Amino acid sequence: GTGKTYTLAALYLRLLLVLGGASAFPRPLSVEEILVVTFTEAATEELRGRIRDNIHRLRLACMRGESEDPLLATLLAQLDDHRLAALHLLAAERQMDEAAIFTIHGFCQRMLNHSAVESGMLFQQTLREDETLLRQQVSADFWRRHCYPLPLEVARMVQQHWEGPENLLAELLPYLQGEPPEVRDPPALNESILARHSRIIAGIDDLKRQWRAAAAAIPTILDAHTLDRRVYSSKNLPSWLAKVNRWAEQPTVDYQVPDELERFTSAVLAEKTTAGDPPDHALFAAVQVFYQYRTSLRDLIFVMALAEMRQALEQEKLLRAELGFDDLLSRLDRALAGRGGEALAESVRSRYPVAMIDEFQDTDPQQYRIFRRVYGGKPDCALLLIGDPKQAIYAFRGADIFTYMRARGEVDAHYTLDTNWRSAPGMINAVNQLFQSLPAPFIFSAIPFSPVAAAESNACLRLVVERQPQPALRVWLQPGAGVGVSEYQQCMAQQCAATIRDWLHAAREGDAWLEGRRGRQPLQASDITVLVRNRHEAALMRDALAALMIPAVYLSDRDSVFDTPEARELLWILQAVLTPEKDTALRTALATGLLGFDAVAIHALNNDERRWEQRVEEFAGYRQRWQKSSVLPMLRQMMMNHRIAENLLASQGGERRLTDVLHLGELLQEASTQLENEYALVRWLALQIASPNPQAANQQLRLESDRHLVQIITVHKSKGLEFPLVFLPFAADFRVQKRPLFHDREAYGAWLDLRAAQESLRLAEEERLAEDLRLLYVAVTRSIYHCSLGIAPLYRGSRKKTGASDLHLSAPGYLIQQGQDGDADQLRERLAALASRADGDIVLCEAQASPAQPLAPAQL
């Protein structure tokens, strides 16, 4: 809320008019010479519109000679000739459609096309938006080449990791685009799968041989040393030895070893020795070496598949003269590093002397390398990197906060915006206090937290409920010594829904409103937003709100319309339309929720031949309409005949279902224009349902309505938006990082440790917590007036819920408990201390999970 986009638009005006005093660019620039790069199409259009509006308003101000806008007034004061400036701005306004405002992919594509010779690009290439089928093809090819020929005993070992090429592709998918990470201790690729298998079997056989040779002496050796007899007891030790002995006597057919074998490694025995020297024997050292260098087929196949599939993807696209979105970046990156790289960079600089990169915290190594090669060390050009590292939350899309940290270290000129123009002063103070709980709230020193000040114009912002001003941040604490994740989620969902119910009831009575610059505004459901991490949390909140008769809408762009019940029901209906003479198909269609025939009605049809024939004729008529007028007119006729829209809207969630039906009808109509006949269309629909693609824009669920509804939205999608009231009921939940992908803390390179060593997992977990902290920051800073969040002494897993909880591993727990573990009493003490520092802007209250009275529809 500090105005990064506002500042970018202001810099744009200064560049157009040579403003800025000693820091001004030497000459006026046209809109075609100022490069602005963002990361989404929506952001590009928003930025283009905002810049166009600023140019228009400044031009009018130049003509009038004055402006009430502080920014425009400041710029006017720096202009010597208002008339000349107005003419220049008019020309810029007329050229805005040609302005160089692009997404990163759009910029790379334009540069490759404009400099085809220098970049080595083909003159005619097709941009492939969806590479899903191509990736599936190369994955199946790899599996066919390397896994199908394997003997059965080796294939079983591979199947323990991946059941088929689909599972292998799912694991490799994050590394098939962009730059792959370095693999730590990579296997030798000159070793075949069969050779690795033979080596593993030989190693296990050798260990078994050593165990059999020393088995008789092991009890005597262990008895001669002082071990922890609570572990190596007279009950446990004989049982462990018996299990390992049985394993050592059996022929080796797989890689399985008994868990008890680890009890006899040198390291474990040394740890469990309570006095004197630990047991020392060549067998214990051999077991230690076996565990330390234990190998499997997984790392070899993973690295082989990654290298071969990346190469196969590139070759296949080259043969087809196609490019994916990520290829645009990699091609430009390679071109700039090649022999004609300097000429290409000079061409970019001459075309765009100034570049502004928005949302730079979401960059990656390739993107930064491109702009550094073009603009680095060139004093006659300018590169402005605009972003907030505290809002870097898109690692799952390839964004790399460590690239930002590296860039920040390479740039001397840093400027910080220190005034929040969005939120109420109390909200700003609450966030400042929360993130000042410890010196490095975002873990990495390169991402500091600087407290911001509130804008004076926002001093009047406040939420009033039951005629009492509400605190900016309310923390719900679940009572008890400890809770599990499910119990915590259920409690907080009910607490959140009950609070929303109470506030909407107060608003109906005229006792809840928002006070702002425009005076008093009655509180409405559309002012309330619940932020969640995933669709599971969203479903919990929708259910809790629905139980209290509070309508809500989930804003998500990750669900495909083909993954809905309506898609399957529509498939059954179309199958019945094509073959109405098949009784089973027709009964299935009639029994769908869309047509709404219950068991009694279908039974009556079965016993009335005349009425059954009428239904057959009805569906035969639909088939004729389909063949004559296409699929959408046929579906609309069916909807009118059976009053599908009216029946859906009268049911719970009917608006959502009707939106999906209409959406599916449009997609079917679009697909029918490219398919041969009706049967091909039904097959197409069945394939889409079997393999939905939520990444395809036309498949993503459409918003049914957000008018006077509580909004449920993911934190990732909320970035860049603002909401009057924000609820974070599940803020304390987290998932421990199990993928050993981490970054070097000095060179900032990405590493993947397929052996999942403890240090690698520790670094990966630290990065997970750091991103969760940034997610929390994004979530709480969406609020204008108020934010409520739920917290509890949370225990993950099935361990006993006493003593220190796992809360410190979550983002709010890390801040509140200052990175230390603690029990429920210590958590309450820390929360009380935080509230006292905030001077009333943070309030702690007990969460109540008791059932509440629903809010009647009329009360909305």
Image (spheres, grey):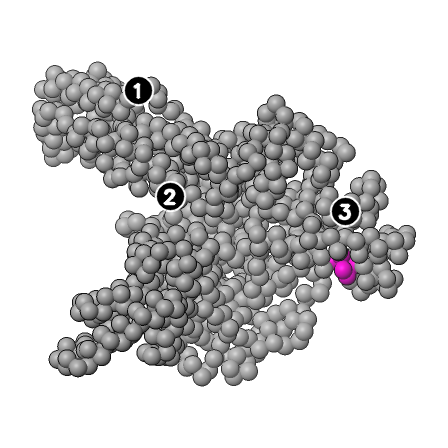
Q: Which residue is the site of mark 1?
A: 191
Residue 443 in sight here: no
Indicate the secondary structure of the residue bearing disc 1. Answer: loop
Between the C-alphas of marks 1 and 3, the distance is 59 Å
Indicate the secondary structure of the residue bearing disc 2. Answer: helix
N-terminal of the pair, mark 2 or mark 3, is 3
User: Which residues, given as a range, are shown in magenta?
Assistant: 54-58
Estimate how packed mark 1 is, as few (under 14), some (14 to 19) or many (20 or more) residues with alpha carbons within 10 Å. few
Residue 618 in sight here: yes
What residue appears at the point 14 percent right and 80 percent down from the top-left corner? 609
What residue appears at the point 56 percent right and 64 percent down from the top-left corner? 723
Camera-nearest residue between 686 and 280: 686
Mark 1 residue type: Glu
Estimate how packed mark 3 is, as few (under 14), some (14 to 19) or many (20 or more) residues with alpha carbons within 10 Å. some
User: Could you say where residue 316 lies in the image, as x and y percent from the top left?
Assistant: 42, 34
Mark 1 or 3: the one toward you: 3
Mark 1 or 2: the one toward you: 2
Q: Which residue is the site of mark 2?
A: 133
The correct choice, above or below, for 604 with respect to 779 in the image is below
Q: Which residue is the site of mark 3?
A: 30
User: Could you say where residue 828 lies in the image, as x and y percent from the top left?
Assistant: 44, 57
Q: Main secondary structure of the magenta part?
A: helix
Q: Is residue 123 magenta?
A: no
N-terminal of the pair, mark 1 or mark 2, is 2
Between the C-alphas of marks 1 and 2, the distance is 30 Å
User: Could you say where residue 763 lies in the image, as x and y percent from the top left?
Assistant: 44, 35
Between the C-alphas of marks 2 and 3, the distance is 43 Å
The correct choice, above or below, for 838 with respect to 395 in the image is below
N-terminal of the pair, mark 1 or mark 3, is 3
